[in-house]
Each structure stands twice: as C-alpha cells, then as structure tokens.
Image: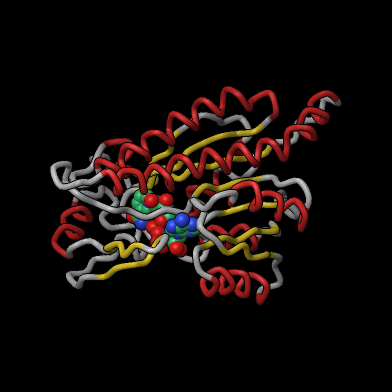
Amino acid sequence: MCNKLQGQVALITGSGRGIGKALALKLASKGVRVVINDLDQEPTEDTVAQIKATGGEAIAVVGSITSEGFADNFIAGAVKAYGTPDMLINNAGYTWDSMIHKADDEQFDAMYEIHLKAPFQLNRAFVRAIRDIAKKEAAAGIENFRKIVNISSIAGVCGNTGQVNYSSMKAGLSGMTKTLAKELGRLKVNVNCVAFGVIDTRLTEATDEKKSITVDGREIGVGVPEKVHAAFSAAIPLGRSGSAEEAADGVYLFCTPESNYISGQVLLVAGGLSL
Ligand SMILES: NC(=O)c1ccc[n+]([C@@H]2O[C@H](COP(=O)([O-])OP(=O)(O)OC[C@H]3O[C@@H](n4cnc5c(N)ncnc54)[C@H](O)[C@@H]3O)[C@@H](O)[C@H]2O)c1
C-alpha cells in the first residue's frame, strides 16, 4: 500500500517529551523525516534515538525557541538536512500561572515569547523557506499541500482561572492561524490549530508535590493539585484525561492529505470538555 506521508519532512518544536514526542514517533512510523527540538540535549536526542531504533529518520536541534535567531536557524538546519519542509508543528510550551492580581509582567512576557512570538517567527521562517517552490508548483498547476499546526489549549478557547497570561497567548494563536490560512491558501499551506484539554504529561500531572522545571533559566512549577485534576477529569464527557498519544493523533489528522481542504480551524481535542 502506498504510504501517503513517506519521505515528507516535519519540524516539531518541544518534541523531546510529551505530546510533541508522541507526534514525532507517530509521524516517523509513517516514514516522515522529523526534525526534533527541545531545550535540553538528553530528551531531544532520546526522541531521535527512539525513532532511529525503529528504522525512522530524525535529527536533533537543541535550543530554546525563544532564543535570538532560533527560528531561522531551525528551519535552515532542516532544509540543509532534508530539503524543503512539508510540515511545521508549533508545539513547545509551558505554563506559568497566577491569578491576575499576583501576575507580574515577567510572567506575561514569558508566555508571549513562547506561545506567540516564537510561533510567529517559526511560521515566518517556514513560509520563507517554502515560498519559491510553492509558487513554482502553483504556476505549474501542481497542488502540493504543506501543513502548519499551531498548538493551543482549551484555556485559549474557553479561558481558565489562573492562566490570564497563557490563555491570552493561546487565544492569540487562533487569530494567527486564521490569518495565515488566508495568506497561505494560494501556496497550498493548510494552517490549523489544535487546542488540548487535559492531557497526561508532566505539565498537567496530578500531584500534590511541588515540582518544577527550568525554562530559560527560570524555575517554573508544573503539575496540577490532585483535587483540581480530579475535578477537571470528572467534567470530561469521555470520562478521563487523554494520553499524549491520543493528543498527538488529533494533530496527526491535520498532517495528512485527508485534511487538504481544511484550513483556518481550531480543533478541540479534549474528550468533549468545553469549560
Ligand atoms: N498537557 C496538557 O494538558 C496540555 C493542555 C493544553 C495545551 N497543551 C500544550 O501542548 C503543548 C505540549 O505540552 P505537553 O503537555 O506535551 O508538555 P511537556 O512539558 O510534556 O512537553 C513540552 C516540551 O516543550 C519543551 N519546551 C518548553 N519550552 C521550550 C522552549 N523555549 N524551547 C524549546 N522547547 C521548549 C519542554 O522542554 C518539553 O519537552 C504545549 O504548547 C502546551 O501548552 C498541553
């Protein structure tokens, strides 16, 4: 049977862990060559090693998507290794919660940098890399669809207490998605957005322990108090939180040719939850 994604090239930010990693493994299993990115060397190279161990192709690009020049270097690295890219998934992210009366500008700016500015820069670099060839294809009457998927959250669609910074930026990604869908249709780029509900990763792990991660030199808390997690899970019509693999499957839909006539959409992958 013909493998519809064989040989395509996908770039996925934040794919050393969680949903990004699950998506990378899924795409690689379909013959996609994947450019893996994360903050630290170990998770980034682990994902690459797992892909290679199953006969797939991947390269690692370690670094923060918010660092100066990252977007252009990331895309240029992919082009050098594999040629013109087919897909970009803007997935890297984290939360830094506070109620508005306690939230400071640093928290707001950090969420802007990672959830809006970096995806803008990455989308721009992707478009610059594919523009000439996409125009030539269009002039020759060839419809070769490429894909951008921006990863959002139910917090960006419905709001969420304690996440004024995160929800504002994730909502902004929806505006970016809709505008780029309009700008890039003529280049046959489908631009869509996937907004997750409660997915089991370290970001939303049910825990009463104080856990933290280091992002760009800052200690940031992760995990959700067990009671809060249970309350969210009880409100999910499908009865439980989702796995990283189930979340990745929602993104995968927008990576396949079956979504070639879908653009500018925000898909909730949340087990039916709408807050
Ligand atoms: N887990 C959920 O319930 C949930 C819900 C809604 C939205 N999301 C979104 O899904 C995406 C993936 O999150 P996840 O749940 O898989 O979390 P995760 O922590 O398991 O994975 C996110 C990855 O992004 C990386 N990352 C963070 N900052 C980075 C940076 N500056 N540069 C490069 N990499 C960076 C992290 O190191 C991590 O490996 C995020 O955008 C998140 O906001 C998750």
Residue furthest toward the right? 140
Q: Relative to residue 195, is residue 5 drawn left or right?
A: right
Q: Is residue 3 visible?
A: no
The residue sitting at 68% across, 73% down in the picture is 52
Residue 18 to residue 174: above or below? below
Percent coordinates x, y for residue 174 in the rendering: 43, 33
The residue sitting at 66% across, 36% down in the picture is 127
The quarter of the rendered structure image containing the C terminus is top left
Residue 51 to residue 236: above or below? below
The quarter of the rendered structure image containing the N terminus is bottom right
Q: Nearer the viewer, residue 28 or 220?
A: 220
Q: Quadrant of ligand 1?
A: bottom left
Percent coordinates x, y for residue 225 in the rendering: 18, 63
Q: Nearer the viewer, residue 266 or 215?
A: 215
The residue sitting at 44% across, 29% down in the picture is 175
Residue 2 to residue 207: above or below? above
